[in-house]
């Protein structure tokens, strides 16, 4: 790629404003994609301060300059807020210093303030050049070769405050930090039956506070978008008191740092503590999480998504023409989107104006449909049910009794099953259902191990790994169907909520297809996807997948440290059966050089080329090489076989070791993402059951998340979406991301723009 001066394009990348986990992944992707496209990337150090200072503040970057940074928090190129850059003199210095290196294209990673300042600089660029020519700081030829500044933005903000994007860089990692703190605080709070007030970041956006409250099973939340009414103190204290009376041992209030009352007066964590002391006579404890939310390693999501954003930003800025308007590259529904920069920033800044104008509904809607929905769900799940009024001596008829909905797990264990069961019980009670727990899957139902679950019974389940109800992989056999029908009748089960994996879907499908023979199966049934394999139809993601991915990434990070110290190749085996989601995404998130999938298979010719590339890499000075293999990528080319082939080809140049990650991928507490998704999917499922029971129709569905929206599909048409031979969906959106692995991990030649995919279009093509 050549500029107007006939030289390769020079691209500057800078991080500005507050740091966010995942910035390094974005920087790495920008740099390496630019190199693959024939451009020359430069780091503008310490944000705009580096551009103003010049000299060593602007440095050329090579491929290896951004090696081994995916797992690091913060930003390796530094960030700062530059007061000098806001002045004309500072912008003149920045323009002069950028032009010394021939840079007229920038990828800026920061918040709305950073991007606004960048756009002002872009608009001032022509006049800045005129002044620099007049003062003799640059030549007229230099000005003519770089007449405009072309800018692409990425939003790095843990607040998740960009209107139009689902998740900004750093948000998921910040939620990880918050949930870790809440889970830790909950155990000590429960031990002493204490109340804790936790303040989280979010000056104008309550996303972190709200999602942490939902995922942490908290009692009350204060967010900027919905200031509480004048009686909020009484409302909060009554909620806390009711929770304790319903069986809670601890209470937790989450306060966003930007929370205010309706008069605009700030509500601090200490204000909340004082209210609790005055009205409940309890000495609450305050924990202000502060900058711990910005720190630590990025989550798996903030690595792989930031990588895609960086690739797309480099592609965008390289392809921009002088008249192109600046854009923000953002994520929506697991797809890369181009958003007009200043329109989105204006919409983002308008939210606080909506709050100031008391247009709280408008502010909530600006945050997206999911934000308002989660506010509703939090209110329902955090409020204990009122005691029902009963007439003495009256016995309800069968038609008047509450409908009995049974929760059953089936298939392999998935982190988040307990979160889903808890949400089902509490939301089901709000629908006036009697909620039943089936212990031990379908075998447990056959054995009659069915018990009623109350609001208090599921207290503490929100963050527990494993499955309190137990799960079994057995699919009911034809011979067991009669007994299964009798068990449903015996326990007066009116509807089934099946939460589980592939075998859970097969079990429910069998009940539906046998309805003509067994009338007991003529009840509403809904399947909720919970599988670490992410291999279920009708949903782009399953409950448990994000947790498994993060578990795999943590293990692979440790493996990479071992490999780097020993001049070693690791062949790591990742779960997923015949679905390669975990393998591909863990490869993207850890910077693996090669990923083998069942969807692609393994060939001898491919192995020969991969071995040759590996040998050449080590000869060129590489100290580690990570290969990830899906556990069923090939019947014959096993992990052991691959390791032996690579070792033989290396001839002692490097060591080769195997690492089978195994069942640690199923363990641990569910991530915030899995907890939130479990809540959304179960809420929709219960609404489906409520409608079906009200109409008296035995509908059967499976729910899922598709293009960012919760949807449902008829269970009897499940095979339309399913590849039964390979136990995975027919169309898998994430397959469109496969080229990203090689793009940013292997420096093997220059590419054209057409060779670098538009990952938004690629994902849509794979999904359809």
Image (tube, rainbow, N blue to C red):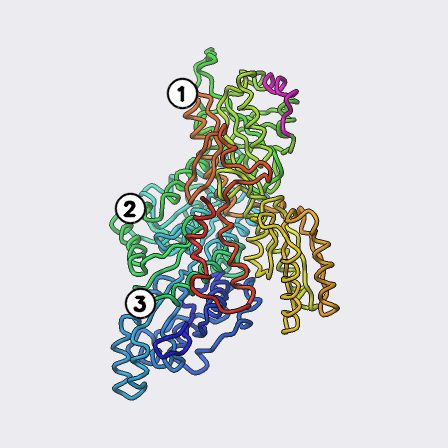
**Identity of the residue drawn at 56% across and 65% down:** 746
Q: Main secondary structure of the magenta part?
A: helix
Q: Looking at the picture, how far across and down is residue 105, in whole percent?
A: 37, 71
Label 2's element?
A: helix
Give the residue at mark 1.
695
**Identity of the residue drawn at 61% across and 50% down:** 601
Q: Residues within 10 Å of mark 3 (few under 14, many from 20)?
A: many
| Sequence-wise first label, 2 or 1 | 2
Would you say residue 272 is visible in this rendering? yes
Give the residue at mark 3.
119
Label 3's element?
A: helix
Nearer to us in this view, 399 or 132: 132
Inspect the magenta stretch and tell me whether residue 308 lies in it: no
Give the Cα separation between the discs numbered 2 and 3.
27 Å
Which part of the image, by quadrant, shows the N terminus? bottom left
> Extreme front residue here?
605
- Left or right, 571 with respect to 488, comes to right
| Total numbered badges shown on the rendered structure | 3
**Mark number displayed over residue 362:** 2
| Magenta-drawn segment | 475-487
| Sequence-wise first label, 2 or 3 | 3
Would you say residue 425 is visible in this rendering? no
Q: Residues within 10 Å of mark 2 (few under 14, many from 20)?
A: some
With respect to residue 208, does 378 lie above or below?
above
């Amino acid at each position: 790629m050549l500029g107007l001066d006939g030289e390769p394009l020079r691209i500057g990348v800078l991080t500005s404003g507050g740091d966010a986990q995942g910035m390094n992944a974005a920087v790495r992707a920008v740099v390496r994609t630019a190199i693959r496209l024939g451009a020359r990337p430069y780091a503008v150090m310490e944000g705009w301060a580096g551009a103003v200072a010049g000299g060593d503040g602007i440095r050329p970057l090579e491929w290896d300059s951004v090696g081994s940074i995916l797992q690091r928090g913060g930003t390796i190129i530094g960030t700062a807020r530059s007061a000098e850059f806001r002045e004309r003199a500072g912008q003149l210095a920045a323009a002069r210093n950028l032009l010394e290196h021939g840079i007229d294209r920038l990828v800026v990673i920061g918040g709305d303030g950073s991007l606004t300042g960048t756009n002002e600089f872009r608009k001032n660029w022509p006049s800045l050049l005129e002044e620099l020519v007049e003062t003799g700081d640059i030549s007229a030829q230099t000005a003519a070769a770089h007449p405009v500044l072309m800018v692409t933005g990425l939003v790095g903000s843990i607040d998740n405050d960009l209107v139009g994007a689902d998740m900004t860089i750093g948000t998921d990692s910040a939620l990880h930090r918050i949930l870790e703190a809440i889970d830790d605080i909950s155990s000590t709070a429960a031990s002493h039956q204490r109340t804790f007030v936790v303040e989280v970041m979010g000056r104008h956006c309550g996303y972190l506070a709200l999602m942490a409250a939902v995922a942490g099973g908290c009692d009350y939340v204060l967010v900027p978008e919905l200031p509480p009414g004048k009686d909020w103190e009484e409302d909060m204290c009554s909620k806390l008191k009711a929770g304790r009376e319903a069986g809670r041992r601890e209470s937790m209030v989450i306060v966003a740092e930007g929370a205010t009352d309706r008069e605009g007066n700030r509500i601090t964590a200490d204000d909340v503590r004082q209210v609790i002391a005055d009205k409940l006579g309890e000495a609450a404890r305050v924990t202000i999480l502060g900058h711990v939310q910005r720190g630590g390693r990025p989550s798996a999501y903030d690595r792989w998504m930031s990588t895609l954003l960086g690739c797309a930003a480099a592609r965008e800025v390289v392809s921009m023409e002088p008249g192109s308007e600046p854009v923000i590259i953002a994520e929506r529904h697991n797809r890369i989107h181009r958003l007009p920069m200043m329109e989105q920033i204006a919409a983002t800044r308008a939210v606080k104006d909506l709050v100031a104008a008391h247009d709280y509904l408008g502010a909530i809607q600006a945050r997206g449909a999911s934000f308002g929905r989660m506010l509703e769900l939090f209110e329902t799940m955090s409020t204990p049910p009122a005691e029902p009024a009963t007439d003495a001596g009256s016995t309800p008829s069968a038609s008047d009794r509450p409908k009995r909905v049974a929760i059953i797990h089936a298939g392999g264990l998935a982190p988040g099953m307990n979160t889903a069961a808890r949400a089902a019980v509490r939301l089901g009670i709000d629908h006036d259902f009697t909620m039943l727990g089936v212990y031990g899957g379908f075998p447990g139902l056959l054995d009659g191990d069915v018990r009623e679950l109350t609001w208090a019974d599921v207290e503490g389940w929100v963050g527990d790994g494993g499955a309190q109800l137990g799960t079994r992989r057995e699919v009911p056999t034809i011979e067991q169907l009669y007994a299964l029908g009798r068990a449903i009748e015996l326990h007066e089960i009116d509807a089934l909520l099946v939460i589980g994996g592939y075998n859970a879907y097969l079990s429910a499908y069998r009940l539906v297809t046998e309805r003509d023979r067994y009338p007991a199966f003529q009840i509403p049934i809904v399947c909720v996807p919970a599988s670490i394999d992410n291999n279920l139809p009708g949903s782009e993601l399953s409950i448990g997948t994000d947790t498994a991915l993060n578990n795999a990434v943590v293990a692979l990070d440790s493996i990479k440290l071992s490999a780097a110290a020993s001049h070693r190749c690791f062949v790591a085996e990742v779960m997923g059966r015949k679905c390669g989601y975990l393998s591909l995404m863990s490869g993207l998130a850890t910077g693996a050089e090669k990923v083998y999938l069942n969807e692609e298979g393994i060939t001898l010719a491919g192995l020969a080329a991969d071995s040759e590339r590996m040998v050449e890499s080590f000869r060129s000075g590489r100290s580690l090489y990570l290969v990830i293999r899906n556990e069923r990528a090939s019947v014959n080319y096993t992990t052991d076989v691959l390791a032996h082939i690579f070792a033989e080809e290396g001839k002692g140049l490097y060591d080769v070791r195997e690492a089978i990650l195994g069942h640690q991928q199923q363990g641990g507490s569910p991530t915030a993402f899995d907890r939130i998704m479990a809540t959304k999917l179960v809420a929709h499922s219960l609404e489906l059951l409520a409608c079906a029971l009200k109409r008296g129709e035995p509908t059967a569905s499976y729910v899922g998340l598709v293009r960012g929206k919760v949807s449902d599909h008829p269970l009897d048409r499940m095979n339309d979406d399913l590849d039964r031979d390979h136990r995975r969906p027919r169309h898998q959106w994430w397959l469109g991301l496969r080229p990203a692995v090689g793009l940013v991990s292997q420096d093997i030649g220059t590419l054209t723009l057409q060779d670098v995919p538009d990952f938004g279009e690629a994902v849509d093509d794979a999904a359809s």
